[in-house]
Amino acid sequence: MKEKTDWPASLPPCVRIERRGGIAIVTLNRPEKRNSLSDELVIGLQTFFSTIPRDVQAVVMTGAGEHFCAGLDLNEIKEAGTAENFETCAIGQRLNDTIQFCKVPVIAVLHGAVIGGGMELAAAAHIRIAEPSAYYALPEGTRGIFLGSGGSVRLPRLIGASQVVDMMLSGRVFDAVEGRNFLRFSQYLVEAGDGLQKAIAVAEKVAKNAPLANYAVIQAIPRITEQEPANGLFTEMLMVTLAQGDDEAKGRLRDFLDRKAGRVVPQ
């Protein structure tokens, strides 16, 4: 059953929240601007991701209208000075760091424009579900600007440095199929209009996991990939000890061994 909430009360109209049980759906709500990232929208999203209640087990992030996010609102930076550009970059990086290291998994629904800062925002999510209308571009080079919300760090790790360089220099655009099969940017590609439904279904499965196990996955994996192998292996041991020592994890293992939980089968 759908539940709505005004949590947190301080959010601007460009950020819309809906609750479906343990799932929170956050919508970028500037459809008339293709959900481009104004300072108000970025700060509103920062507030949302920084104040997630304990009973929320997963977040679905989507865009109102025909697009996910067309990038930075260039009207806000076209005459900006050095200090203003620095601050815009800082709040964008802070938001995407908060999303990547959120306390619960974040699933992004990609449709229409996923451009520049929008692609940086999507890269911070843990799971990306694309509809056929999605298209990806990093036109910063052609506009005389640079990635400014952590994309120069995240995107090369997701799609490869050479692809990022090509997209920024040439303005190359990838469609949804290329984004899934060539860039490997989205993990899922669904039929038109099915993105939100699929994201909610995935979120519901994720929400059934042990919360500590979910937290360990989204916190540890990105950090382990940045560590030297020996340090990564040690971090892995720490996470195994932490996750498997949890009472809920022990109960789930007992249920599996007692055949009270389903086994892994092809889907």
Image (cartoon, helix red, strand yellow):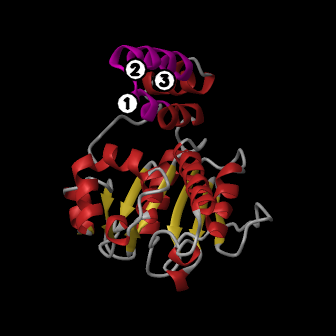
* Closer-to-camera residue (72/134): 72
Are circles 1 and 2 on residues that touch, CB within 8 Å?
yes
**CA neighbours of label 2 inside 10 A, class few (<14), some (14 to 19), many (20+):** some
Of badges 1 and 3, nearer the viewer stands 1
Q: Could you tell which of marks 1 and 3 lies nearer the N-terminus?
A: 1
**Residue bearing mark 3:** 253
Query: Could you tell me the amino acid type at mark 3?
Result: Leu
Tell me what residue is drawn at x 53 percent, y 59 percent.
60
Query: Could you tell me the amino acid type at mark 1?
Result: Thr
Residue 13 visible in the displayed image: yes
**Residue bearing mark 1:** 225
Q: Could you tell which of marks 1 and 2 lies nearer the N-terminus?
A: 1
Q: Relative to 94, say whether 228 is above or below.
A: above
Q: CA distance from mark 2 to mark 3?
A: 25 Å
Q: Residue furthest front?
A: 81
SS category of the residue bearing label 1? helix
Residue 160 visible in the displayed image: no
Q: Residue furthest bottom?
A: 32
For residue 191, which quarter of the picture?
A: bottom left
**Residue bearing mark 2:** 232
What is the number of the mark on residue 118? none
Q: CA distance from mark 1 to mark 2?
A: 7 Å
Tell me what residue is drawn at x 46 percent, y 69 percent.
71
